[in-house]
Image (spheres, rainbow, N blue to C red):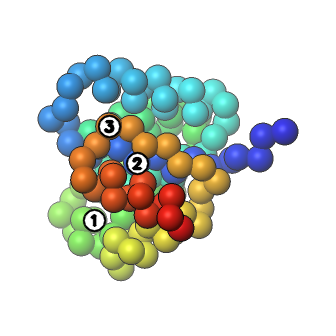
Amino acid sequence: MNHIKSVCVFASSSDNIDKIFFKDAEKLGKLLAENKYNIIYGGSTLGLMGTITKTAKEYGSHITGVMPEKLHNIGISQGPFSEFILTKGMRERKAKMDELSDAVIALAGGFGTLEELSEMIIA
């Protein structure tokens, strides 16, 4: 029996990557939604993060965006979320994402994606 209900997704927050990755992000968003997974993510509409969550929301997923105040204050937290959690900083953000998720998936990204995934593996 599957006990995973919420999946944390880390991925690029940049639109400046190869378009093939966006097709994969759409497929992942649809797959997660069709399998009734909630999605926990960084709360941005940008890059692969935005593509995954927009697609998943379209197919019925509950989306929880988690973002630190500093990023929220520059106006990138306009995601398709069902729920939005504002944190003081990045450490609190990652801890909250870890607390809310049962599994983690990472797609293409940069150093931020690698750092977030590494911390989740170690946690």
Query: Where in the figure is residue 102, as x and y percent of width and height?
Result: 64, 54
Q: Residue at x 28, y 43 (%)?
A: 109
Mark 3 in CB contact with mark 2 (< 8 angstroms): no
- Where does label 2 land, which residue? 10
| Quadrant of residue 20 within the rendered picture | top left
User: SS of the residue at dot 2?
Assistant: strand
Name the foreground residue: 63 vs 99. Answer: 99
Q: Secondary structure at mark 3?
A: loop
Q: What's the residue type where badge 1 is placed?
A: His
**Helix, strand, or loop for circle 1?**
helix
- Mark 1 or mark 2: which is in front? 2
Q: From the viewer's perspective, is residue 88 above or below residue 76?
A: below
* Quadrant location of the N terminus in the rendered image: top right
In the picture of the structure, the residue carrying the numbered disc 3 is 108
Q: Earlier in the sequence, mark 3 or mark 2?
A: 2
Name which residue type carries label 2. Answer: Phe
User: With 111 as the anchor, is 57 left or right in this view?
Assistant: right
Q: CA distance from mark 3 to mark 2?
A: 8 Å
| Closer to us: 30 or 98 | 98
Earlier-in-chain disc, 1 versus 3? 1
> What's the distance in space between the residues labelled 1 and 3, CA to CA?
23 Å
**Distance (Cα) linking label 1 and label 2:** 17 Å
Badge 1 is on which residue? 72
Residue 80 visible somewhere in the drawing = no
State whether residue 114 is above or below residue 50: below
The answer to the question of whether label 1 and label 3 lie on touching residues, with beta carbons closer than 8 A, is: no
